[in-house]
Amino acid sequence: MTQPLSDPMPQIVTAGVDGMLVRFADRLSEPANRAALAFRAAVESLGWDGVEETSSTLVSTFLRFDPLHLSHDDLRAQLATLLKSQDWYAADLPQGRRLWRIPAVFGTDMAPQLEQAAQAAGMTESEAIASLTRARVRVQSIGFAPGQPYLGELPEAWDISRQSTITPRVPAGAVAVAIRQFVVFSRPSPTGWLHVAQISAQLFRPEADTPFLLRPGDDVQFIATEPGALEQMRSDPQGGATSEAIE
Amino acid sequence: MTRMLTIHRAGPGMTVQDAGRPGWLDFGLSRGGAADMLALAEGAALLGEKGTHTAIEMAAMGGEFEASEDMRIALTGAPMKASIAGTSLAWNASHLLPAGARLSIGAAQTGNYGYLHVGGGIDTPEHLGARSAHIAAGVGAALDSDTVLKIGPDRGGATGMTLDVEDRFGGGEIRIVASFQTKLFAQEELTRLEATELRRDPRGNRMGIRLEPDGDGFHAESGRTVVSEVVMPGDIQVTGDGTPFVLMTECQTTGGYPRIGTVLPCDLRRVAQAAPGARLRFRFVTLAEAVELERADRKMLATLPQRLRALIRDPHMMTDLLSYQLISGVVSGTEDDP
């Protein structure tokens, strides 16, 4: 059988009976993530009849549609035409992006794996904090759990593996690092990623008017904060996070 | 007067459910909604409900309920032993629940998810456009004993109606299509998957159901790590030890485990309703066949209201129920179609 690694990209593939996936790469890269975000925004703005929902993952745009209303062949042809209309790997990111500055406690007993992660990246703890707070990272995708962002791309030193032993539970707001990415957990979760920082901003508040803090495509920078100060920010659902529009 | 349904006793995993909340996938929230969407539609048909319909989903175990005024109810999904004031009730049917009478619903006799529907629907607040609890996401919560639920105004209609339903509680053949990661598995693995009998493991919930293969597990070729990609209900995820899990209504939205195929939407309710220990077998169909099966299923759903017929009443039950006010208060609101 053909292996996806040798498949030319981008490719249009079916997902189940009522899904179509436009894949821009088979591994994470900035251009592929840019393409996935931009292509999804383009599909949304076209508002095709029969398309019920869209999303973007790290390297793909996903469409859920009604195959009784819009055939697989027709949707595939529409997507192929749209793909050809421009170079999506060099496309502008969607409008409405914001830069978030989010206070975070690095290390301490609130984020006990900073030392281990720094070691894996060949840094001291303070070098690691400096590197991780200097990085301005993009919300490459929100997924797995509601409001849960995957942020990247971190400098090459952070191309560290996930642990083979799973941490049974990190709390909501845990910032964990691996494979040149951060993930910030929106719900308490088991993970193989290394828990390096903790935020008090709530990523998902189902009863709020704005239930999700972040949107795919937003930029994020963490601000190193003292544990006492972070505790005080807990009364604020945004946990001290501020945002500004990216022009 | 506000119509209320009191849950005196709730089994574990009892939730308010509807057709789910589409539109939040890009924010990591899966659609959710009733584990058995057909049971939701059957209840709506039995009560003549139009549009969005919200019911109480009971996971393997029922509870005790009381209405503040006479209400029409319907029972669908996994059959459970049900009675009003000691008089047993037919499943897959609509009934009158008189004000103040106790409705008792027991354990599922077969299958997993039973549904209690009330004329007018469950009128709890909406979150992100729906009323259904999405336990995995922390939207809403399981219903506890002594919860009082607001019930919407009933447009009125018949009770004592029944519906012949599809038997979907015993497992059997589940039709699947190849999906974008199926080719990570060698053809021999796919052939073996179709030939392998799988047992529904007790470990299963609204997020996913574990299936225990009769024989070896299944493995993707060369153990390649795949980039995390979109996940949808019905996906058959194969974990590191080779065990297949069917992802259900509250599944995660992305995942890194390879998916060997995807269950047809019209067969997913049979996976949801296969009781622990039930035996299932997967069979690949083409995408074209899958679309035609979906078309047939959609047609079947549309004909549910026309397939109602009157229950044959048990005279003993009539006697008992006549001690309650059967007539007054059954119809409230307008009976005119909007």
Image: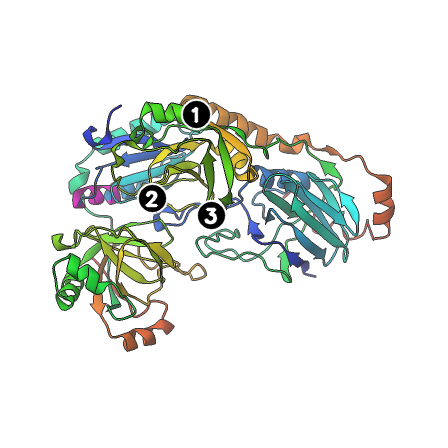
Label 2: state its secondary structure. Answer: strand
Q: Mark 3 or mark 1, which has the lower sequence index?
A: 3
Dot 1 alpha-carbon crowd within 10 angstroms: few under 14, some 14 to 19, many 20 or more: some
Relative to A70, residue A159 above or below: below
- Report the magenta residues as a range: A30-37
- At label 1, the amino acid type is Glu
Numbered tag placed on residue B21 in the rendering: 3
Q: Depth check: A206 or B327 in front?
A: A206
Residue at the (29%, 66%) spot, across then down: A198
Residue bearing the label numbered 1:
B194
Q: Is residue A238 above or below residue A59?
A: below
Q: Say which chain tag 3 marks.
A: B
Residue under the point 17% across and 61% down: A118
In this picture, residue A62 sits left or right of residue A130:
right
Does the stretch in magenta take in A75?
no
Q: State the SS at label 1.
A: helix
Image side of residue B233 versus residue A231, left or right = right
Place residue B8 in its image quadrant. Answer: bottom right
* Residue A33 is inside the magenta segment: yes
Which one is in front in this view, the residue at disc 1 or the one at disc 2? Answer: 1
Task: Mark 1 vs mark 2: tell me if same chain.
Answer: yes
Residue B162 point in image, percent of width and height: 71, 36
- Name the amino acid type tagged 2: Gly
Can you give x and y, in whole percent of width and height, for residue B226 in the image? 26, 39
